[in-house]
Image (cartoon, helix red, strand yellow):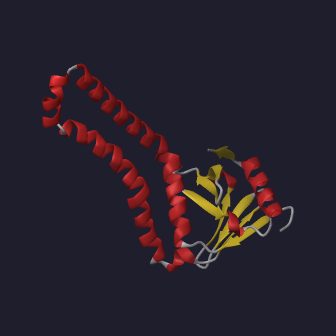
Amino acid sequence: MTLESITVRFTPTAADYVRVATRIRLHRYGPLSAIIFGVFILYVALNVAALLENPDQVLKFLSSMNRFFFPLFAALIVPLVLLVIGPLRIWLRVSGEPRYLTETSMTFSPDSIVFKDAHNELTQDWSNYYAIMLSDKDIFLFLSINTSLARFIPRRAFESPEQEAALITLLKSKLKVEG
């Protein structure tokens, strides 16, 4: 590691890809899930309030339970897709493909980022990225062309806390920090 560039090396695991994909989905769709759940709770509260106001409507309400179960289904399906089906699909795709699980190196300099693995070498300008997000286990670099795509660096890839701090300082000087 020099002052001009910082290189990190790691071998991603299928669990890394699932964790990262889940985190990115929550970052992107978490507010939508919260809104859907909030609307469902409001819907239930309004129905309960109407029943308490007019108790003879209980039988009518029970006969029209599809009115109740549709929002329940909608409130449950969004988190199910985000937190179960999506990560399972990624696990199955990544664990069966050795090309995703090869050692990766990323070299960050003030001018560019160089990505290398067993199959590719790619030099990219900083303008290809628009933001970073820091989590307890990873650092995410969000691509400018598709804000739901990100490269990740597991925090275990750093040789020292100083190297991690130096990279975070460089990233913060080049990109905005999100959530």
- Image coordinates of residue 18 in percent, x first then y, are 50, 64
Q: Which corner quadrant of the image does residue 2 belong to?
A: bottom right
Image location (x, y in percent) of residue 121: 64, 72
Q: Is residue 69 above or below residue 122?
A: above
| Quarter that holds the C terminus | top right
- For image coordinates 42% across by 43% down, the residue present is 33
| Quadrant of the snapshot with the N terminus | bottom right
Q: Left of 28 or right of it: where is 66?
A: left
Residue 178 position, x and y percent, is 63, 45
When the figure is inspected, residue 59 is found, relative to residue 114, above or below; the finding is above
**As displayed, is residue 18 above or below residue 73?**
below
Of 57 and 80, nearer the camera is 57
Count of number-bearing discs: 0
User: Residue most toward the right?
Assistant: 3
**Rendered image quadrant of residue 51:** top left
Q: Nearer the viewer, residue 141 or 124?
A: 141
Residue drawn at 31 percent across, 26 percent down: 46
Q: Is residue 120 left or right of residue 53?
A: right
Q: Reply above or below: 81 against 72.
A: below
Q: Determine whether, in the image, residue 95 is placed left or right of residue 10.
A: left
Q: In the image, residue 103 lies at what x, y percent?
A: 63, 77
Q: Residue at x 19, y 24 (%)?
A: 55
Looking at the image, the residue that sits furthest to the top is 53
Give residue 161's quadrant in the image.
Answer: bottom right
For image coordinates 53% across by 66% down, the residue present is 17
